[in-house]
Image (tube, helix red, strand yellow):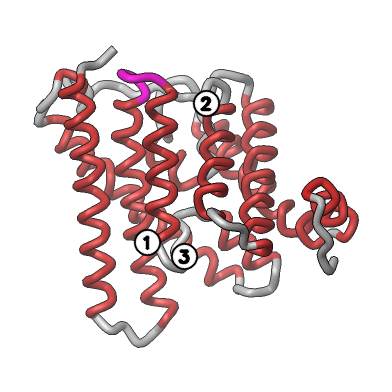
Amino acid sequence: MGGIFGLIVSSAYIGLTCLIAWWARQLADRLQIESNFKKLLLLEGIATWELCATCFELIIVADNYGVSTYALFLFVLTIWWSRNWGDATACPYTHFEDVAEGKKLIGQALVMILAQLAGGLLTYGYSQFLWSLEVSANHRGRAYEACTADLQVPALIGAVIERAATCVCRLASRFIAELNPAFGTELDAFIGTSLVVAAFNYSGGYFNPALATSLKLGCDGHTAEQHFFVYWIGSTVGAVASVFLFKNPEARAKVFSLLGKEKDL
């Protein structure tokens, strides 16, 4: 169990990361980029950098203070991201969802994903530098040690978990956006965080290919092929499935029946 000073240091690192990303978004606005597509590319890179850098530090939090503390941090951060990222998602499969809905061409989606991956890859050196300072005992020796995979089940089971949880998470987000309830952002964050915690000891509960790749690709415990299958194929299939389930009249009827609401299907 880590001490209070270590938790303060981790909180400060997370706060610094969010502040840097906020400044970067302000700069992006001041650049007055005429192309909305090019501006979104930049914002996706910034958002993914922020997501992955904060989640690197959440690894330290989880290892030293437990999943409950990790979940609290993640819940608060998810609300922050929802209110500050704008149209950026920091998540590759959202662009595949757009392709499935006819909102985006596959080429555009792939370029967006490359921007996200670039942002995610930039976090490694940043986090390694902060950890190498060893301001707290929690970071001692962590900057250069070999990482281990979070996949604790066979790859097929892991892919099923990532697929199912991603589908549920995306469906929840879509229905919350449509119904627009009070505290919808907080509800969405609570559902997402709960799903992450539920999958934490099985697949790691990433539900985001860029995040999983930034944090865990090449770690001991799974091959690159298993990583791609679980965290890219699994979650992307779940996300795209949510697009069609959300539009399915029978599925919508069941959801609104459970909620006790009447809605045009």
Q: CA distance from mark 3 to mark 2?
A: 28 Å
Q: Residue at x 60, y 73 (%)?
A: 104
Q: Which residue is mark 1?
A: 84
Q: Secondary structure at mark 3?
A: helix
Find residue 75 and report its horizontal and vertical position in percent.
44, 40
Is-magenta flag for residue 216? no
* Region of the chain picked out in magenta, as a range: 62-66
Q: How many marks?
A: 3
Mark whose residue sits in front, 2 or 1: 1
Find residue 248 and report its horizontal and vertical position in percent.
84, 59
**Callout 1: few (<14), some (14-19), or many (20+) C-alpha neighbours within 10 Å?**
some
Q: Which residue is mark 2?
A: 200
Q: Main secondary structure of the magenta part?
A: helix
Q: CA distance from mark 2 to mark 1?
A: 26 Å
In this view, the residue in front, 138 or 129, is: 138
Going from the N terminus, do you reach mark 2 or mark 1 first? 1
Going from the N terminus, do you reach mark 3 or mark 1 first? 1
In this view, the residue in front, 229 or 77, is: 77
Q: Which residue is mark 3?
A: 112
Q: Secondary structure at mark 1?
A: helix
State whether residue 251 is above or below residue 4. Answer: below
In this view, the residue in front, 156 or 16, is: 16
Mark whose residue sits in front, 3 or 1: 1
